[in-house]
Amino acid sequence: MIFLLLMGPPGSGKGTQAKMLEDRLGLRHLSTGDLIRAEISQGTTRGKEFEQRINQGMLVEDSQIFDLLRNYLVKIDSRGVILDGFPRTTQQAHMLNDLAAELSASITGVFSLTIDDRAIVDRLGARLVCQSCGASFNKTTKPPRLDDICDLCGGPLGVRSDDRPETVLVRLQDYAKRRDDIASFYQNKHLWHDVDADRAPELVCDAICRIFKNNVGKGESKA
Ligand code: AMP
C-alpha cells in the first residue's frame, strides 16, 4: 500500500484535491476530519469529547486520532490512500511511520498546499456543508441549485461550526505553529513538496500528479 499525504491549512482545498486525486491516481481518500465527524454523529462519549475540542479549534489528541486511523487502515483493501489531515503533529508523523512499517506501506510524497490566510478566511466563510451526506458547496464558486438544500441528497446545508471566522483564525495559527516541524521531518526524507493552491483546482491537481509521477520511488519512501 502507498500513502500520499496532503497537508495544508484549513480551507486550502485538501478535500477537493483528495477527491480529484482519487480519480486520477486510483487511490482512496481518507480524511481524519471525516473520521472524527462520523464518530461525533454517532453520539458516543468519545464523539462528544471530539466535538468540544474541534468547536474550539483544538486538535483531537494524537493517540485518539491515531486509533481511529489505524482501525480504518488495517481493515481496508486498497492500492493506496490519500491522507487528508494527517499527520498534524510531529508525534503523528512518527506514529504514521511506525504504522507504515507495520502495514508494509510506503509514504510516496507529502504535498503541502500553500495559500495565504486572507484567501482562506474568505473561502471558509463561503463554504456550505450538507448535514446529511457531507457534500461540500460554496456560496460563490459552487452554489447549490436551491438555497440551503443539498443537490445530491436534499439534506439541509449549513456552515460548519469550526468554519466561523474566530475559530478559523485559531486553526490557522495552530497550523502555522506545527507546519515547520512537520515540514522538516519530511524534508529530511526528501518527501516534501510545496504546491501553490491559490489557483483553479484542476491546475493544482495537475501539479501534484506531475510531481507524484516524477517522484514515485525516489526519496525515502519506506518508513
Ligand atoms: P478537517 O476536516 O481536516 O479540517 O478537520 C476538522 C477538525 O478535526 C480539525 O480542526 C481538528 O480539530 C480535528 N482533526 C482532524 N484531523 C486531525 C488530526 N490528524 N489530529 C488531530 N485533530 C484532527
Image (cartoon, grey):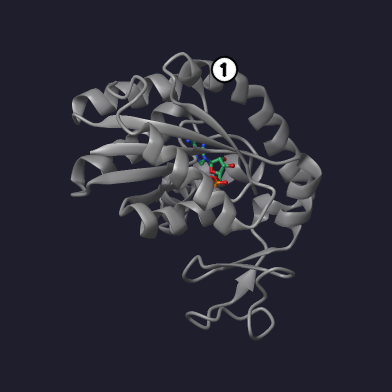
How would you rate the neighbour count of disc 1 (Cα within 10 Å): few for under 14, some for 14-19, many for 20 or more?
Answer: some
Which amino acid, mark 1?
Answer: Asp
Describe residue 160's horizontal placement relative to residue 90 as left or right.
Answer: right
Give the image location of residue 72, x and y in percent. 28, 45
* Residue 43 quadrant: bottom left
The residue lying at 78 percent from left, 54 percent from top is 122
* Residue 54 quadrant: top right
Give the image location of residue 198, x and y in percent. 69, 48
The residue lying at 69 percent from left, 82 percent from top is 147
Question: 85 or 218: nearer the eye?
Answer: 218
Question: 29 or 150: nearer the eye?
Answer: 29
Describe residue 116's horizontal placement relative to residue 131 as left or right.
Answer: right
Give the image location of residue 146, x and y in percent. 65, 86
Q: From what the image shows, is residue 58 above or below residue 136?
A: above
Secondary structure, mark 1, is: helix
Look at mark 1 in the image and give the residue it sits on. 181
Give the image location of residue 137, x and y in percent. 62, 68
Describe residue 163's horizontal placement relative to residue 154 as left or right.
Answer: right
